[in-house]
Amino acid sequence: MATIGKDLDQACVLLQAGEVVGIPTETVYGLAGDAMRGAAIEKIYAVKNRPATNPLIVHVAGPDRLKGLVESIPEMALRLMDRFWPGPLTLLLPKGPAVIEQVTAGQPRVAVRMPAHPLTLELLRMLPFALAAPSANPYGYISPTTAEHVEAQLGRRIQYILDGGACDKGIESTIVGFEQGMPVIYRKGIITDQDIKAVTGRVRFYETQNAGAGNQVDKINKVQQARPLPANTVNSGQHQVTEVAALNPHITSGMSLSHYAPKTPVFLLPDFSEPAMEARVADAVSAGDLHALLKGLQMMERLERHLAPDVLDRIRQQDTTIRMGVLSFQRPYFPENSLNGLALRQILLSPDGNLDEAAARLYEALHALDQLGLDFMLIETVPDTGIGQAINDRLGRAAVQ
């Protein structure tokens, strides 16, 4: 089992010896190793069971530590660093001669950021090298926001976790690169497109040619409603991650269609604010009829495609051993945590409707629900504006079956 502590000297000794260490950031906990040492990078990939085609993010103590890591820095990138570093912004820049091939997975650019967590910033200042650090979880699983999350997931595979408390932001960093002078967001995060635009004057989101129009939630719902697609299964060490298709190539981190996912099957709830649907749901709740409730929510077709036959039979038979979780933004879907004897587990991300609070609590809530042995969970998206776009992006990727 890994040791959890606050000993920076011990973390330094291990990292200088080529080991990997769990570290806190303001976003999520990372699995850190010497970014200049191939053996350490290979350990990161091995511990996470991360595909070697998925690049890593390099963490530095400040812009002055970028020498050799990046070939050049556009003026807009300098302005973004000045505004958002230290903080949850990763910049995708032309890689320099010091960057080894494994870090970028053969891509011509390297992702770099200066984290805002004081403990990790001090660690980076103590070390003579930068740290490559993806999230400290098995590949594809829910990102960790506490040292205890890291220990539960990777504690048998690493020696030490630097404990910096719960992460303030709770969502991975925004990743921004530049194409023909245009700032491009490759991964949505706490820093929004409007935040970027306020500094650069312009910005766009990255999309592949076949990504089509619409937001991430629309795309995921289309995948769930379509027939099952041919799947490649990746063994994460704790669960099986099924990638039905690649939404984007692995230009940088966090671009897999299936990502941030619990072991429990996850389904996105539709908007049931339409009077007819809301009435059907209310009638089913009053009658204590789970099957009618799920039909009223227009969920049964998707459940039938992805749940095991025995679970579906239990739903139809109103079996009270069915265990269902509900993660909603602001309001509870059920007046009580039961439905005609059926035990429910509801978690609200923010009773006050605060998107910052919802982001900070998202992974914590997913971890909590995933530990309950549920048959499935239903998740409500949040308002798709500002930070809500990043939250919905994570929910959509977690919901892919």
Image (cartoon, rainbow, N blue to C red):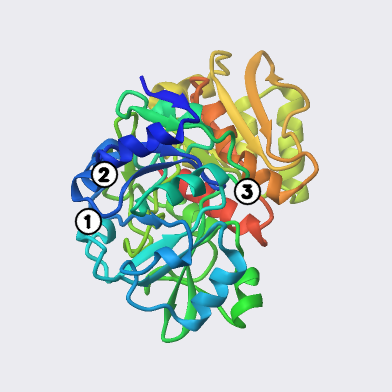
Q: CA–CA distance between discs 3 and 2? A: 31 Å
- Of helix, strand and loop, which one carries label 2? helix
Real-space CA distance between mark 2 and mark 1, rounded to the nearest whole angstrom: 9 Å
Question: Measuring 19% from the left and 45% from the top, which residue is drawn there?
Answer: 39
Q: Do labels 1 and 3 touch, CB within 8 Å?
A: no
Whether residue 227 is situated above or below residue 233 in the rendered picture:
below
Q: Nearer the viewer, residue 330 or 228?
A: 330
| Quadrant in the picture for residue 96 | bottom left
- Secondary structure state at the residue bearing disc 1: helix
Pick the residue in front: 121 or 385: 121
The residue that disc 3 covers is 381
Residue occupying the point 45% across, 23% down: 311
Tell which circle, 3 or 2, labels the residue nearer the N-terminal end. Answer: 2
* Of the image marks 2 and 1, the number of the one nearer the N terminus: 2
* Residue 306, visible in the rendered structure: no
Residue 273, position in %: x, y?
Answer: 74, 49
Looking at the picture, how far across and down is residue 82, in whole percent? 58, 71
Q: Which quadrant, please, contains the C terminus?
A: top left
What residue is shown with label 2? 45
Q: Residue at x 36, y 36 (%)?
A: 21
Residue 102 badge: 1
Mark 1 and mark 3 lie on one chain; the one further toward the N terminus is 1
Q: Position of residue 98 (x, y in %)?
A: 25, 65
Residue nearest the observer in this picture, 225 or 359: 359
Quarter assignment of residue 139: top left
Name the image quarter holding residue 16.
top left
**Left or right for 340, reference 182:** right
Comparing 177 with 318, the one in front is 177
Q: Amino acid at mark 3?
A: Thr
Do the numbered discs 2 and 1 sit on residues whose CB atoms are within 8 Å? yes
The answer to whether any part of residue 373 appears in the image is yes
Other residues around mark 3 within 10 Å, as few (<14) / some (14–19) / many (≥20): many
